[in-house]
Amino acid sequence: MDSSARSSIRDGATAAVPFGVTSLVFGVSFGVLAVSSGIEPLVAIVMSATVWAGSAQFAIAAVLGAGGTAAAAIGAAVLLNARYGAMSLALAPSLSGGPLRRAAESLALVDESWAMATVEPGRFDLGRLLGAALVMYPAWLLGTAIGVAAGDVIGDPAALGLDAAFPAFFLALLVPQLRDRPAIAAALLAAVIALLLVPFVPPGLPIIASAVAALIGLRRSGEPR
Amino acid sequence: MSPAWLCVLVVACASLALKALPAVLAGGRALPERLRGVVALLAPALLAGLVVTQAIAGDRALVIDARLGGLAAAAIAIALRAPSLLVALVAAVTAALIRAA
């Protein structure tokens, strides 16, 4: 590895420190909420190590905690992570080497590392991507471990209002996404779909059905962006 | 296998595939223009669905309880640009206080 690659990894790691702190704290809350949803501590830690995506993991804990099926939890989590497919496509031209190396490099992809590695729209600095991931990943894992340890000693989650922390978290994740009118329209439509379905279908399904609202983003070919 | 382990296994594999496959296979081709808008809206749509179901859903019933008060307090905290952990804490404390009252 040459010195410019090493220095851009260092750049990425330094830039990621504030996000690493947020990720640690976020990991703690995931650990606490996962345990309060009935997920075993070991499962929560392995989930953080292998899935490594906050919103998808919170969705799994939320659906299982509400008595939903594994299929509903998986459906919601995979749909939430679908954005990684699009981000990985955008990243592809900036990666180097053979298939194995490209696959390994792509694992450094999370929302924050992707954003921090953006040099200009469509061009990415691989060193910054890896550097950011080297800070974010251990922070997320350590936070989860602290959270499950704390969650084990916390008593009845409802008495502490922990069940109210779930929708609050999702709202905090949602608000920064409402950047333009299509996003706001999709969110409102999704909320209405979920609201209408809750009384009639098993827990978890209204969340998956709410994804249908994203179809308003379907463009006719040739339509301007 | 418990439902939680099954979730970890399937979602971990799906996440790894979603991250790695496009990067390995695409070689610089872009997502079809028509689908790009849908992918961009998946996150806001699902997160809105999660907010609603987590705030007022019971088992096949709409349930109005302390969670809704917590969510309202959270909305105020978000408007005041509080960090996400503080937002969740405000919601939890509000709901706990409503239940204790």
Image (spheres, grey):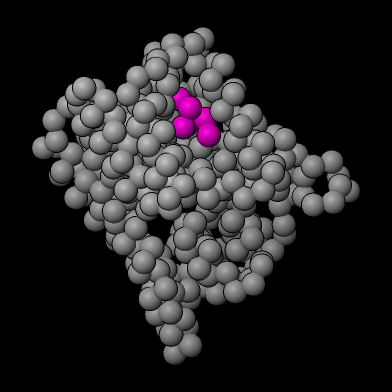
Which residue lies at the image location 51% right of the left edge and 9% below the top edge? A200
| Residue A113 in picture, x, y percent from top left | 47, 64
Q: Quadrant of residue A95?
A: bottom right
Which residue lies at the image location 75% right of the left edge and 49% below the top edge? B32
Which residue lies at the image location 52% right of the left edge and 45% below the top edge? A175
Which residue lies at the image location 62% right of the left edge and 63% below the top edge? A92
Q: Is residue B52 above or below residue B31?
A: above
If the image is split into quadrants, where does the N terminus of chain A sit? Answer: bottom left
**Residue in front for this viewpoint, B17 or A203:** A203
| Residue A129 in picture, x, y percent from top left | 48, 69
Whether residue A63 appears in this view of the structure is no
Q: Which residues are magenta?
A: B48-53
| Residue B73 in picture, x, y percent from top left | 37, 37
Q: Quadrant of residue A151?
A: top left
In magenta segment, residue A34: no
| Residue A210 in picture, x, y percent from top left | 58, 28
In magenta segment, residue B52: yes
**B29 on left or right of A90:** right
